[in-house]
Image: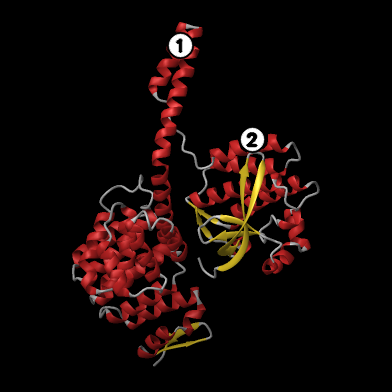
Amino acid sequence: MKDEKGYAVLRLSMCGNNCRVVMDFQKGVLWYEKFAPGPKIVKEEAVGWMRQLVEMAFCVCMSREESGRFLFNPYGVLLGADRNLYLLDMEDENNESCKKKGQRKKIKEKFECTGEREVQTMFAAGRMIQCMMAQSDIYPSIHWREKQYIKKIVVLCGRKEDLEKKKKSIERNVHCLGRKRKPVPAVLWGILCLSLCIGGGGWYAIKHVKEEGQKKHSIIEKSIVGKMMDDSYMEQGKKYFLEFGDYEESKQCFGRVEDEHEKAKHYIILAEYMSGQEKEEKAKEALKSLEAEDKGDLLCMLRVYEKIGDMEDCEEMIDLAKRCCIHEYEKDIYFNEKREFEVKSILCRMYEMTGQKKEADLCYEEMSRLKLDEEQRQQYYTQWAKALMQRNDWKKSDEVCQKGIEKVPGSDELKRLRVQAMCMFPDNSREKLLGVLSAYIAQNPNLIKDEEIKKIAAQYQLKMEGGKIWAGK
């Protein structure tokens, strides 16, 4: 996490009906700084922060501390280096500037309402959840059912009713966030039907089976919950690495499980290398030690190899890219059409670098079947055209540029490349080149200022002025 500073914070925990408050010191960034630029956040982490905000709000409501010690708005909450949320201790003189900012009129208008401390605190928690949803890009996107739960939580936070009643309703909705719905086992349906046939005694049987099932589930859950948390942080780290290119956040996630996961230590080195904090030799050592267990591993390794850009690694990169594309990606949490485009773009470059021209052309043809946005289409046709020009295949390069311009009419880069290809293709006449340039300049007069276009015009004795082009002597 960038620009971390140390702050005096309060740790809150419930003990019966009372809230225990313990002073602590944590490094991190303030909540408003985190969300000011509209960050990209992994869904699991966003849901976790929503839960923590609600839990902290209930603790503040149950606390016997003076209200002046808490400031429940974006200027009074810290996102710690451990990825958890903390309340700043407003009695600490070093937090005075945060207190002044958080008590400004425009902040109070957004995060305060009339009523007692309990009402104000819960209202502020709901508003902060709203801000997080509005100002951040959450991946994967929040499901419509989960959005309904979040709306209910925000509405409940704003209601002026009994705290205990409100708490139960909010906790019920918070519990549903991020939860995967499981199908009811056929055995239980059978027991239910049987009990209905038997009569009253059947209901006791159902209750007994349910209690036994809950006990077994509790035992299993406790035994695997640690592993699930570790896997969750590894998954979040890979998503920050791949989806957002946020290597600082990725490093923080891997850092939380480096003692339990040997692989996490290698990923920390890779994240540091990608953010310019680690040397290439260290990154290569980490890559050699890292065993790919899923497509997330393959994609991360491929991206690091590409940045290193060593010719010796071309065959290794081709192998990684092929392994990424072997299986269908519909069921994979890391591999989608966006990632497939990235992988095949790298694969094409590696084929070109190793002289495998037929394989490169086949790969480019396969990429044409992907659903690409405008930026990806321009990148695709530009990369293919440049590769063909490096092979001196001017005719095919001209054809690829024409296809690209049809798909992306506003691409000056493709128009520039096509004009360059036409100049190198001997069958193209000066008149044809003039006609093509005239059409492109009519679409975008600023092309006259392009240095490459100026050179070509001078070479063919073409005159350009006032948004027009014509043949000189």
**Under tag 2, what secondary structure?**
helix
Reply above or below: 206 against 429. above
Whether residue 242 can be seen here: yes
The residue nearer to you, when weighing 334 against 457, is 334
Q: In the image, which disc is placed on residue 195?
A: 1
Reply above or below: 134 against 225. below
Query: What's the residue at 70%, 51% (across, down)?
Result: 124
Whether residue 372 can be seen here: no
What amino acid does circle 1 point to? Ser
Relative image position of residue 144 (x, y in whole percent)? 54, 42
Would you call the spot at circle 1 few (<14 residues within 10 Å), some (14-19), or many (20 or more)? some
Q: Quadrant of the C terminus?
A: bottom left
Judged from this view, the residue extending furthest toward the bottom is 473
Asked if the residue under mark 2 is in contact with the one under mark 1, i.e. CB atoms within 8 Å, the reply is no
- What colour-coding does the image apply? secondary structure
**Distance between mark 1 and mark 2 Cα atoms:** 31 Å
Q: Quadrant of residue 453?
A: bottom left
Tell me: 200 left or right of 112: left
Reply above or below: 203 against 219. above
Q: In the image, which disc is placed on residue 428?
A: none
Relative image position of residue 128 (x, y in whole percent)? 65, 53
The residue nearer to you, when weighing 198 against 389, is 198
The residue nearer to you, when weighing 92 against 322, is 92
What amino acid does circle 2 point to? Lys
Relative image position of residue 33 (x, y in whole percent)? 61, 65
Q: Quadrant of residue 308?
A: bottom left
Tell me: 101 left or right of 197: right
Query: What's the residue at 44%, 20% (across, down)?
Result: 209
Label whose residue precedes the other's in the sequence (1 or 2) = 2
Q: Which residue is mark 2?
A: 168
Q: Quadrant of residue 431?
A: bottom left
